[in-house]
Image (spheres, rainbow, N blue to C red):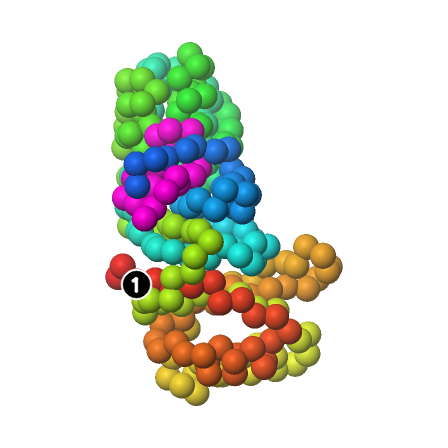
């Protein structure tokens, strides 16, 4: 049974929308890293974004999964993202726009057409809405839910050239092993052919690698770990074989792919 769920706040964020799918005892926190810390201390759950269809992986989430070996993926959900420019002033009077970097990137075409407007990065779109509500010349790029929550009366939908979806994962101390999509993190030897040997294990078994991404190891300069998602049959022999090609390997769980 799902207990308390920590999410990236303040209230009104897309993370809250994802968290509501899994439970009702929701607690907003200031950062993704804090969500991992709270789970480690309390044994409860958290919801974190892991990838955006336009902007790619969420590095803070990948690093949290790598640093916290005892935190795993429990479930998964995809949330369509609609961004609105929300304010309490007329559009021509906006002097500052607050938002999360991903929302800022999505609104890039719109922002390129604006002049004399300062763009301020925030930790979440709901924090942006909160700040805009306290700024008479401020606006936020946020969800309609956040705009309504913070009383931003003027809203204009930002049209996107491509479909915008964010994948969220429910994380906790219990690893889910059911599903068709699997996630591993690994460190491989720094020598020619190491990565080829690792992913060759998947290829030789007819397993599709859906995503691979590298992130720096914080304790060793110019060394990296790899985040890998793949679809297909997962068994102990596969993990053992991949482990032989790695210096360190972490199986973080599986989930049913939404697509």
Q: Is residue 24 left or right of residue 63?
A: left
Residue stretch in magenta: 1-22
Q: Position of residue 204 (x, y in %)?
A: 43, 87
- Decide if residue 125 is on the left or right side of residue 180: right
- Dot 1 falls on a residue whose secondary structure is loop
| Position of the C terminus by quadrant | bottom left
Farthest residue toward the bottom? 204
User: In the image, is residue 228 part of the stretch drawn in magenta?
Assistant: no
Name the residue: 42% across, 63% down. 253
Q: How would you rate the neighbour count of disc 1 (Cα within 10 Å): few for under 14, some for 14-19, many for 20 or more?
A: some
Query: Residue at 35% across / 30% down in the picture?
Result: 12
Please tell me which residue is depicted at 43% across the width and 57% down the height of the picture: 174
As drawn, 183 above or below 57: below
Seen from this angle, which residue lies furthest top? 136
Residue 139 occupies quadrant: top left
Circle count: 1
Q: Is residue 220 above or below residue 232?
A: above
Residue 216 lies in quadrant = bottom right
Residue occupying the point 38% across, 66% down:
177
Q: Is residue 77 visible?
A: yes
Residue 176: percent from the left, percent from the top?
A: 38, 62
Q: Quadrant of residue 194?
A: bottom right
Q: Is residue 204 above or below residue 149?
A: below
Residue 171: image x %, image y %? 43, 51
Residue 52 visible in the picture = no
- Residue 163: image location, x then y, percent: 29, 50
Can you identify the residue that label 1 sits on? 256
Asked if residue 180 is positioned above or below residue 67 in the image, the reply reads below
Asked if the magenta segment contains residue 20, the reply would be yes
94 and 188: which is toward the camera: 188
């Amino acid at each position: 049974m799902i207990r308390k769920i920590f999410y990236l706040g303040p209230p009104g964020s897309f993370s809250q929308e994802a968290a509501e799918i899994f439970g009702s005892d929701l607690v907003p926190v200031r950062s993704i890293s804090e969500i991992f810390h709270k789970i480690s201390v309390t044994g409860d759950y958290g919801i974190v974004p892991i990838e955006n269809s336009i902007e790619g992986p969420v590095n803070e989430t990948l690093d949290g999964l790598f640093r916290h070996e005892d935190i795993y993926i429990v479930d998964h959900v995809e949330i369509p993202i609609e961004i609105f420019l929300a304010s309490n002033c007329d559009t021509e009077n906006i002097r500052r726009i607050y938002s999360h970097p991903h929302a800022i990137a999505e609104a890039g075409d719109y922002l390129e057409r604006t002049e004399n407007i300062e763009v301020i990065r925030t930790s979440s779109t709901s924090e942006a809405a909160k700040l805009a509500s306290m700024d008479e010349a401020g606006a936020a790029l946020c969800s309609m839910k956040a705009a309504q929550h913070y009383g931003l009366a003027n809203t204009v939908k930002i049209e996107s050239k491509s479909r915008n979806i964010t994948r969220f994962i429910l994380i906790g101390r219990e690893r889910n092993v059911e599903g068709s999509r699997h996630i591993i993190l690994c460190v491989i030897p720094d020598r020619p052919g190491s990565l080829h040997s690792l992913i060759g294990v998947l290829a030789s078994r007819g397993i599709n690698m859906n995503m691979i991404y590298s992130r720096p190891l914080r304790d060793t300069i110019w060394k990296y770990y790899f985040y890998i998602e793949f679809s297909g049959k997962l068994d102990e022999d596969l993990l053992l074989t991949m482990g032989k090609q790695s210096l360190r390997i972490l199986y973080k769980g599986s989930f049913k792919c939404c697509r």
